[in-house]
Image (cartoon, grey):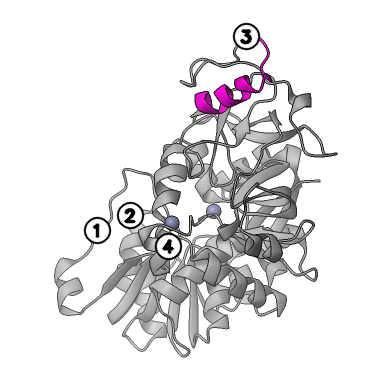
Amino acid sequence: MAFSYLSRRLVRGLLKPSIASRSISHGLPKSSEIDASAYHLGGGPSFMRGTVFWEPNKPLTIEEFQMPRPKAGEVLIKTKACGVCHSDLHVIKGEIPFSSPCVIGHEITGEVVEHGAHTDTEILKRFPLGSHVVGAFIMPCGNCFYCVKGQEDLCEAFFAYNRAKGTLYDGETRLFFRNSGKAAYMYSMGGLAEYCVVPAHALAVLPSSLPYSESAILGCAVFTAYGAMRHAADMRAGDAVAVIGIGGVGSSCLQIARAFGAAEVIAVDVQDEKLQNAKTLGATHTINAKKENVIERIKEVTGGRGVDIAVEALGKPLTFSQCAQSVRDGGKAVMIGLAASTAVGEVDINRLVRRQVKIIGSYGGRARQDLPQIVKLAETGTFNLDATVSRKCKFEDANGAYQDLNEGKIIGRAVVEIA
Ligand SMILES: [Zn+2]
Ligand SMILES: [Zn+2]
C-alpha cells in the first residue's frame, strides 16, 4: 500500500534517495524520503507531529509526519483535542493487536482545513472550511452492506481496513514519517496528532457554544454510551439501569440513562471516588464491588427482580458475569467493555434460556444518525461534558496520561489538548 503511494510520487519526481531506515523490525516496506517542502497545503505547514505507538509496553513517542492529505470524501482536520481512551491503552499494552507503528487517538475535535479532491458537494456544504467538528471513532464508509442498512456501527470497511490493517478504505494510510517517508498506520483517524484525515461520514458539526477540549469525548465515550442505550438496550423512560465500571464510558452511560429517563441508575465500581462522582452524574444508588455483593445489592434496590438494563463497561470476565446476573427476567445485559483478545465470559445457560435474559454486545454508535443527536444533548446541557472530563493535558504529556489511565488514576476522562 505504501509502495503504490510512493510510486505515484516517484512518477511526479518528488522522491529523494533513500536514507537510513529508522526501524526495519516493523515489517514495513523499505522506501525513500519525500521532500516535505514539495508537498503541503496551500500556505499551510508541510509537516506535523503525531504520537506514535511502536510496540507493546514501549513509551509512545512524538514524531514528525508529512502533512496528511485527504482523498475524495475525506476531510483534513486541524486537531484541537483528543480523548485518552482505554481502547488505545489496549493497543499500547498489546492486548488488542494492531498494525504498528501507528498513530493512536480516536476521540477528536478540530477545525476543517481541507477537503479531498472530488468530494461530494453536499459534504463540502455540510462541513465548510473553518467549521468546528467532532469525529466518531467508528468512521462509516457509507456504502457497505451494513452502512446501507443504517447499521454503521458494523461498517464492513471500517473493520476490514481500519481495525484489521490500520488504513482507510482504499487500503492506504494517510500517514508517512517526515524524514524516512515510511508508512505509519492509523488507529481510527490517528487523532493524537496535530492534523488527521477523517472520512466525512464520521463527522458532525460542533456548535461554537461547545468547547473543543471537553467535546472530544463525544466521539467515543459518549458515542459508545449513546449507542449502547439507544440501539442495544433500546432504553425506555422508567427503566432501571445498572452500570458496572464508572470510567469515561461508564460515567457517560449514567448521564445518557438519566437523559433517557431512567427511574433508577445504579453505579458499580471499586473506587469510592468514582462512585462519589457518579452521584453528580445522575446515579441514584452506588455500589462498591469491593465491599458489597453487587448482584444482591442490585436486587435489593429493584424489589428483588434485578434491573431492566445492566451495562458492563470494563471488559472483564467477572464483571461480564455480574452484568448478566444483575438483570431481571427478560432483561438486557449490554456488554460494551473491550477485553483482552483471549478473554471469555461465562453465562448460566438455563437461566438465559428459561428467564429470557438477553446478552447484547454493543460497539460505538452510528455516526451519521447518532453523533448529531449526541452533540445536541451536550449543546442543551442535558449531557454535562464538564462533569465527565476530569483532566486536560498537553500534547507532549499524552504518554503520562495513558500511564495514569492504566493505573486507575483518572476518575472520568482525560483529554489531550493540541495547540
Ligand atoms: Zn475510545
Ligand atoms: Zn460501511
Magenta stretch: includes residue 7: yes
Sequence-earlier tag: 2 or 4 = 4
Q: Which-is-in-front pick, marks 3 and 1?
A: 3
Q: Which residues are magenta?
A: 2-18
Q: Quick check: 27 left or right of 182?
A: left
Q: Is mark 4 within 8 Å of ligand 2?
A: yes
Give the residue pinned by disc 4: 147
| Residue at the spot 50% in from the left edge and 30% down from the top edge | 100
Residue ID for mark 3: 20
Residue 234's spot in the image, x, y percent? 41, 79
Q: Quadrant of residue 297?
A: bottom left
Of helix, strand and loop, which one carries label 3?
A: loop
Whole-number angstrom distance, CA of label 2 to CA of label 3: 46 Å
For this view, does 395 lie left or right of residue 152?
right
Residue hosting label 2: 317
Q: Label 4, label 1: how many angstroms apart (C-alpha)? A: 32 Å
Q: Earlier in the sequence, mark 3 or mark 1?
A: 3
Judged by depth in the image, the label closer to the viewer, 2 or 3, is: 3
C-alpha gap between disc 2 and disc 1: 7 Å
Closer to the chain start, of discs 2 and 3, is 3
Question: Looking at numbered disc 2 in the image, what kind of residue is underneath it?
Answer: Pro
State the SS at label 4: helix
Question: Where 145 falls versus 350 (above or below)?
Answer: above
Are the residues tagged 2 and 1 within 8 Å (C-beta)? Answer: yes
Q: Secondary structure at mark 1?
A: loop
Disc 3 residue type (three-letter)? Ala
